[in-house]
Amino acid sequence: MKFYPQQYKLPDVSMQPFIDDEEIWDFINQAKAEPETVKAIIAKSLNKNRLSLQETAILLNATDPEMIEWIKAGARSLKEKVYGKRIVLFAPLYVGNYCSNNCRYCGFKASNTTAVRKTLTREELIENVKALEEHGQKRLILVFGEHRTYSAAFIADTVRDVYQVKKDHGEIRRVNINAAPFDIDGFKTVKEAGIGTYQIFQETYHHPTYAVCHPSGKKADYDYRLTALDRAMEAGIDDVGIGALFGLYDWRFEVLALLRHVNHLEACYNVGPHTISFPRIQDALEYDLDDTYQVKDEEFTRLVAILRLAVPYTGLILTAREPERIRKEVLAFGCSQIDAGTKLEIGAYAENPDVDQNLSKEQFKINDDRTLNAVIDELIESDYIPSFCTACYRKGRTGQHFMEFSVPGFIKKFCTPNALLTLAEYILDYASEETAAKGWALIGRTIDEMEDDGYKDKVRERVERIKKGERDLYF
Ligand code: SAM
Ligand code: SF4
């Protein structure tokens, strides 16, 4: 089969818009999913090659159940070949829900007068971070509405405050942010505070749908949002996350547009996004859209498998928006991160768990409200290694996912050992007795299975040091 070169109508010029709706539809409309072609494309991905827009469009058009199974099996095997068993855990922390935009799907929109507006005070922020630390969280993503209060300087101060909070053995070792786009100086300001990933979702890449969903406020400017990560890169932030909100428009279009975004960043900055997120739209207060483009469970799992094959070396983030059964299926396709123990109500981490959660302070409803310990327990049961690793970011090994993928032995040398060390810390400091027993068994089993090339002993020795009270050991 012939593999096509990537050809675009719009050239990739940095800081310039690059999405042409017609071009994306042309790729989809011209793609024919013949069995032999689909097999060849999957094989190309399993050989660790990125797929082109044409090739991905062919997978998107595969509707035959047998072909869909090949695609899912391909994603499972890529995950096993490349990523191994660990899953990185994090929690979102909503800092403030004032918002001057009117995104039609979001409970925080300005026109929603029933929403209780709140920005955590510094004291409340600290209380919430302590509560998260008391559960064992080590990685947070701070989330903000779009409002003049949440300036780059305010967000940078919040990030610094979070890093300062230490409770017993607890500390937050990586703070990511999901916030409105800044100008280049704003991005420089948040970079100086030591953010991990800057994440922003285009929501929908389809211009007419974007205009309908974002009728007013700064977010109505499609191009300013689309080029946000160009400005982040210009400001020196090379660790960025993209995403689309599935359910606003045709899911096949959004997958291809996400890939187009990856291509743009790679072409202009020589580095693609660290992560891709694919939230599915959830019910929210004053939700104001019909369900024409609702993504069914089967389509959702298929689209995650296709993304995995299309960009084999990019991290995929699954969120608590998805119910447990969906999480289980798509984790096997190589999602590398999930949130756990999530509470979306502002300030809720530090509140009494017996108090009813209140949708008026939430952005939308979540479908998985298990505790961090329950998620960790289930991951261990399913033979995954829960990980709180932050080593690459702190050792300056950026572009982490690319390295995991392309540097031989990287996962064996760094990711698996670090996952085990952070799991050992979690077990000693936070796990229930039952989870601890399963966790130690997993750690023992995984070390036993490691090759005898020096690393096995090093990992054993560090686990023993952690047992004796040392913390934050990593490779
Ligand atoms: N205000 C900033 C913005 O809009 O980029 C950042 C925070 S916003 C709270 C984070 C993300 O939540 C949005 O990018 C959107 O994708 C997602 N979101 C909003 N409403 C949602 C809903 N009803 N269901 C699922 N996700 C939603
Ligand atoms: Fe505001 Fe973000 Fe919600 Fe839009 S998605 S209303 S910008 S918080």
Image (cartoon, helix red, strand yellow):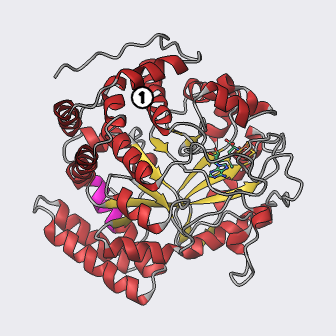
Report the residue at 47% width, 59% height from top.
338
Report the residue at 20% width, 33% height from top.
44
Residue 205 seen in the current view: yes
Q: Which residue position is annotated with label 1?
A: 271
To which quarter of the image does residue 355 belong?
bottom right
Which of the image's four quarters has the N terminus?
top left
To which quarter of the image does residue 184 belong?
top right
Q: In the image, what residue type sits under mark 1?
A: Val
In x, y percent, where is residue 411? 26, 51
Q: Quick one: 281 or 343, which is closer to the camera?
A: 281
Q: Is residue 444 magenta?
A: no
* Numbered range of the magenta stretch: 414-420
Count of residue discs? 1
Report the residue at 77% width, 66% height from top.
124
Report the residue at 79% width, 39% height from top.
101
In x, y percent, where is residue 270? 41, 23
